[in-house]
């Protein structure tokens, strides 16, 4: 009987709150239009988020890369704290590979994904491998980013693209919306052959419906 009452209580609570994920408020304002898969930003489970993350593929064979930057408020000058940046990308074969235990959007986004959360300085860093292009070479290599900042629903920004990617055509460059700023990064050679890249993000830049 107690179990039944607990189930009913949970159902009533869900009906009232719409069972929103943690860190999501009913007062969050929408911005940026439709965003399929943005709910994945909340799928970090019990993981404690900080400004640095290493994606699961980093220990595998491939070109290692460190991507860093600062997330700024809309003025482009003030560092933004408590912003979650969710990133995911393909494996070296250009596929969103899974390991069989994925849940939620992980079944679509694959196992190579991570989350960082900025501190007061707005800085973030993640380590991963440069992803492979989709089979057939029709799309340039890219990393998908989704942003969740306080007060707004999660939204997507321009993909991380690589300036030296031969598949990245002039037409593709010109078609970038620059949501959050320029997503095309240039790489330099770091220690032990690891590439280094920098991308700063400006919250709300070029997003429709952003106050």
Image (tube, grey):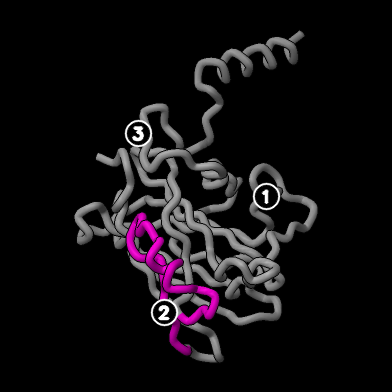
Q: Nearer the viewer, mark 1 or mark 3?
A: 1
| Residue in the image at 36% along x and 39% along y | 31
Q: Is residue 49 left or right of residue 5?
A: left
Identify the magenta region.
164-189
Q: Disc 3 or 2, which lies upstream in sequence?
A: 3
- Of the numbered discs 1 and 3, the one sitting upstream in the chain is 3
Near mark 2 (Cα within 10 A), the count class, few <14, some 14-19 or many ≥20, is some
158 or 103: nearer the eye?
A: 158
User: CA gap, disc 3 to disc 2?
Assistant: 33 Å
* Residue that badge 3 annotates: 29
Name the residue tied to disc 1. 108
Q: Residue furthest right?
A: 100
Q: Nearer the viewer, residue 53 or 137?
A: 137
Q: Earlier in the sequence, mark 1 or mark 2?
A: 1
In the displayed structure, would residue 164 be above or below residue 7?
below
User: Residue sitting at 66 percent across and 80 percent down?
Assistant: 62
- Residue 186 image label: 2
- In percent of width and height, residue 125 lies at 45, 68
Tell me which corner region of the image, top left, top right, bottom left or bottom right, holds residue 138: bottom right
Query: Magenta includes 170?
Result: yes
Measure the alpha-carbon separation of dots 1 and 3: 26 Å
> What residue is shown at x 47% (from left), y 58% (from top)?
116
Q: Give the structural element (helix, strand or loop) at label 1.
A: helix
In the image, residue 86 lies at what x, y percent?
Answer: 51, 54
SS for tag 3?
loop
Q: Quadrant of the C terminus?
A: top left
Instruction: Check if mark 1's residue and mark 3's residue have beta carbons within 8 Å.
Output: no
Say left or right for 14 vs 189.
right
Q: Position of residue 168 (x, y in %)?
A: 49, 73
Please state the horizontal and vertical placement of residue 122, each as a whole percent of the image.
32, 60
Q: Residue at x 56, y 16 (%)?
A: 15
């Amino acid at each position: 009987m107690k179990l039944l009452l607990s189930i009913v209580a949970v159902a009533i609570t869900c009906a009232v709150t719409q069972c929103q994920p943690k860190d999501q408020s009913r007062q969050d304002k929408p911005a940026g239009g439709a965003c399929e898969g943005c709910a994945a930003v909340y799928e970090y489970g019990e993981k404690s988020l900080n400004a640095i993350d290493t994606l699961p593929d980093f220990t595998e064979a491939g070109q290692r890369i460190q991507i860093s930057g600062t997330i700024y408020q809309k003025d482009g000058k003030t560092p933004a704290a408590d912003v979650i940046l969710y990133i995911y990308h393909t494996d070296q074969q250009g596929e969103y590979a899974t390991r069989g235990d994925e849940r939620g959007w992980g079944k679509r986004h694959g196992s190579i994904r991570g989350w960082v959360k900025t501190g007061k300085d707005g800085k973030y860093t993640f380590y991963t491998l440069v992803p492979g292009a989709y089979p057939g070479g029709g799309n340039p290599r890219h990393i998908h980013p989704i942003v969740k900042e306080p007060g707004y629903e999660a939204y997507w920004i321009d993909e991380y693209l690589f300036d030296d990617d031969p598949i990245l055509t002039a037409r593709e460059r010109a078609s970038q919306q620059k949501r959050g700023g320029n997503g095309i990064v240039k790489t330099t050679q770091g220690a032990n052959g690891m590439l280094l890249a920098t991308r700063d993000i400006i919250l709300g830049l070029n997003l429709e419906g952003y106050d």
